[in-house]
Image (spheres, rainbow, N blue to C red):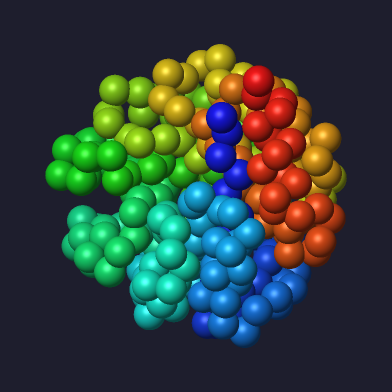
Amino acid sequence: MPTVIPAVDIRDGRCVRLFQGRLDQETVYFDRPADAARQWAGLGAELIHVVDLDGAFQGHPANFDHVAAIAREAAVPIEVGGGIRSGETVERYLGVGVERVVVGSRALREPEWLAGLCERFPGRIVAGVDARDGRVAIEGWAETSEVDAVSFARSLDGLGVRAVIFTDVATDGAMAGPNLGALRRLLDAVATPVVASGGIATLDHVRQVAALGVEGMIIGKALFAGAFSLPSAIAAARGAAR
């Protein structure tokens, strides 16, 4: 059954959502990110996706203490991404109770580094594949590479990553629906489990994404804005996957 994974994005120590990753399009939902994570855990989340937005832009963790507080208080597993560029950072996060770590920018540039991480921390490394117009976006989406996103995702097969998180940048935070075509192409191309992210705004979107065969889906703004409840999303995903 696909897992519905609430997102908790952290900027300047607060839980926020951005529109298409733009820093000038920010909505603050919680002053304390751990409170958001505890809310989702209480409503049935089995995994929480945490992003250090400052870290993604700066290239190193900037909200480590807030992530550690979430890992300590949420009572469910969490995964974290944003500015993770070294094995030492991965080890530090795992050491405070983070279940999985998401890497992206350096993984694109140095696949051998990613393979080494997967060997060192089996089952704990997730690869983020963020796409803008079909190409891989990096450095907190501030840059767009020339690398085709599907080709990059395919290259991850066999490296030992736990899953691939696929985000279509244009849909993220836009509440306009996921890019089902791009997601379908990715699923057809890779053997690694795929988690979808971006654009889910209705329960019909939840059902459509679940029916494609993803392992999970990350939902942020729709849950924070009250478009639907987390329990109803979980039920919709399970029903569509039967």
Residue 147, percent from left and from top:
49, 33
Q: Quadrant location of residue 216?
A: top right
Q: How many marks?
A: 0
Q: Can residue 14 be seen in this view?
A: yes
Q: Is residue 99 left or right of residue 74?
A: left
Q: Is residue 9 visible?
A: no
Q: In this view, does 188 lie above or below 201?
A: above
Q: Which residue is drawn at 22% across and 40% down?
A: 122
Q: Which of 78 and 19 is in front in this view?
A: 78
Task: Report whether 79 appears left or right of 224.
Answer: left
Q: Which of 18 and 206 is in front in this view?
A: 206
**How far across and how far down the image is residue 58, in percent?**
44, 70
Q: Is residue 46 left or right of residue 200?
A: left
Instruction: Tell me which corner region of the image, top left, top right, bottom left or bottom right, holds residue 222.
Output: bottom right
For this rendering, which residue is in front, 45 or 209?
A: 45
Residue ID at (50%, 62%): 51
Report the residue at 35% width, 36% height from top.
Answer: 162
Which quarter shows the C terminus?
Answer: top right
The quadrant in which residue 130 appears is top right
Residue 6, percent from left and from top: 60, 55
Q: What is the x, y in percent for residue 196? A: 60, 37
Q: In this view, does 183 lie to the left or right of 175?
A: left
Residue at 80% across, 40% down: 203
Height in image: 141 above or below 225? above
> If the image is split into quadrants, where does the N terminus sit?
top right
